Amino acid sequence: MKIQTISLSLALAAAIAVFPEYSAAQSFGLDQMKKAGTAYSVDFGALPTAGKGSITLRTPTISSRSGGGKKSYFRPKTGSHAVRLRHLIGFAEASRDDYDSVQHGARTRPVKRPTQMTLAEIFIWIKATPGQPHAIGRYQFIPSTLRHLVRRAGIGTGTVFSPRLQDVLADLLLEDAGYSTFMAGQMSRRKFMHNLAGIWAGLPTSTGRSRYHGYAGNRATISWPFFETEVANIFGR
């Protein structure tokens, strides 16, 4: 199977170009990218270093669904494998607010929509509101995971928590789950799905439950048969 993808290193290089504050040393900003006619997209190729820097899972990396109302699932007919997989994960994790979702247990919510906040503003909100859940965005990043990803990617805290940035951060987690290895045919679908469930608490294991069922109120929000069917549909295997 021919994989028409770009490597994670190239994807991050593109992200650095798109987000002017992605790296303190990066001065090539979005305006220059527009002039150059460069479009940003992320997909993964088979990386020989895929296992390096992976997150060790002791507690949920991502909280389960944020609440805020039910939503219906629709199956995207276009988009890369990564785009369609992120859509499925977003369905399991986020409310109808999608990229602006905030964990339903948060008593004090941010004043602004998350997609209008900088990372610094999100961290200030987290620090100012202890003792409540803070999972945020389409992929329900919990504070420790968000900080880890921001440091890992070298993103400046002045960067806006936009949908595009959220997708970039989620793609790092997909790689931690073994995306490149799976795409190269070196990991089974079942193993990859279990790895995803080890990161996103809203996704089930083959038992039908979240790996973190009952931990801080987490639960699987979709069934294993549904999860299996959709992943098979996305990847054709």
Image (cartoon, rainbow, N blue to C red):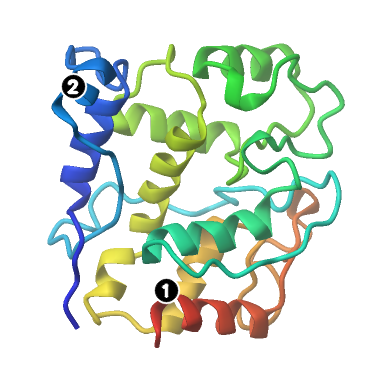
User: Looking at the rendering, which quadrant does residue 89 occupy?
Assistant: bottom right
Lower sequence index among marks 1 and 2 = 2
Residue 174: image location, x then y, percent: 40, 57
**Which residue is found at the position 51% from the left and 29% from the top?**
162
Count residues near mark 2 (Cα–Cα under 10 Å), then give few for <14, some for 14-19, many for 20+: few
* Image quarter in which the N terminus is found: bottom left
Q: Give amino acid for label 1.
A: Phe
**Which residue is found at the position 12% from the left and 61% from the top?**
48
Asked whether disc 1 touches disc 2, contact meaning CB atoms under 8 Å apart, the reply is: no
200 lies above or below 189: above
- Residue 116 seen in render: yes
**Could you tell me how far apart the alpha carbons at marks 1 and 2 are, in whole angstroms?**
39 Å
Residue under numbered circle 1:
192
Residue 235: image location, x then y, percent: 40, 78
> Along the horizontal axis of the image, is 109 left or right of 199?
right
* Image quarter in which the C terminus is found: bottom left
Count residues near mark 1 (Cα–Cα under 10 Å), then give few for <14, some for 14-19, many for 20+: some
Secondary structure under tag 1 reads: helix
> Along the horizontal axis of the image, is 148 left or right of 222?
left
> Along the horizontal axis of the image, is 112 left or right of 164?
right
